[in-house]
Image (tube, rainbow, N blue to C red):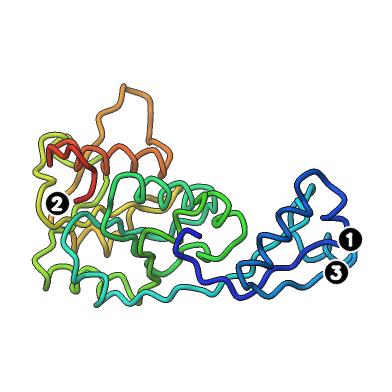
Amino acid sequence: KEGAETAFFLVSEKLTGVSGGRELLQEITERGYRVYSTTESLYKTVSDTETPQGVLAVVKRRREELSRMLLKRGCFVILDAIQDPGNMGTIIRTADAAGAAGVILAPGCVDLYNSKVLRSTMGSVFRVPVCTAGSMSDVIQALKKRGIRVLAADARGEKNYFEEDLTGGIGILIGNEANGVSRKALALADGLLKIPMKEGVESLNAAVAASILMYEAVRQRGCKSVEF
């Protein structure tokens, strides 16, 4: 499901005793997946949730290469040292919903496979391409070579985000929750995207800012479908 390659399932010995558990186990088995059963106590040790559901799917990691990702035109989201798992997961989920071409994780970001990140994506991590890249300068240079403009979210921008052209190939750069986009990344960006806010408000949550900018790109493209 969701484009994930499943290696095997791990089920609790109590699964067949809950409503629908026996039917679920039968369906998994009939589809040809490997299934391993374990004790409830060991299962709870493996699961990192307080109330595990009795079945775990172990899937293989997807490995995306930046060069391959950039073969597609559209809107890319570049994350600069995003450290909150909930923020990263929400950004990936929104990128999926908005039809973004991919999400690029620059150095300093929380691990893509952090359990909280994965749960926050609600399966989107298996649909939208996500790659962990090298240095920020390498990322931005790679985008520019493909004719993709890099625009950084920053309150010091001269224009509001809805005054900028977000059509064509673009990379939306979202900075760290506490410090924003790094100085090095700002110096390499083609422009700044300012989200107007009332006086006294310093900034928006990183995931909220990313969502606003991605959907402005959708609006500008006049898409009946959000596929870029």
Which residue lies under the disc numbered 1?
40
Tell me the element at label 2.
strand
Which residue lies under the disc numbered 2?
191
Q: Amino acid at mark 3?
A: Thr
Q: Amino acid at mark 1?
A: Glu
Crowding at dot 3, Cα within 10 Å, few <14 / some 14-19 / many 20+, comes out as: some
Looking at marks 3 and 2 on the same chain, the residue that comes earlier in the sequence is marked by 3
**Most foreground residue, 60 or 190:** 60
Alpha-carbon distance for marks 2 and 1? 54 Å
Q: Residue at x 23, y 57 (%)?
A: 186
Q: Is residue 38 above or below residue 119?
A: below
- x%, y% of residue 151? 19, 52
Q: Residue at x 84, y 55 (%)?
A: 16
Residue 38: which disc?
A: 3
Residue 94 falls left or right of residue 14: left
Crowding at dot 2, Cα within 10 Å, few <14 / some 14-19 / many 20+, comes out as: some
**Most foreground residue, 74 or 149:** 74
**Tag 3–tag 2 contact (CB < 8 Å):** no
**Most foreground residue, 58 or 101:** 58
- x%, y% of residue 64? 37, 74
Residue 168 falls left or right of residue 95: left
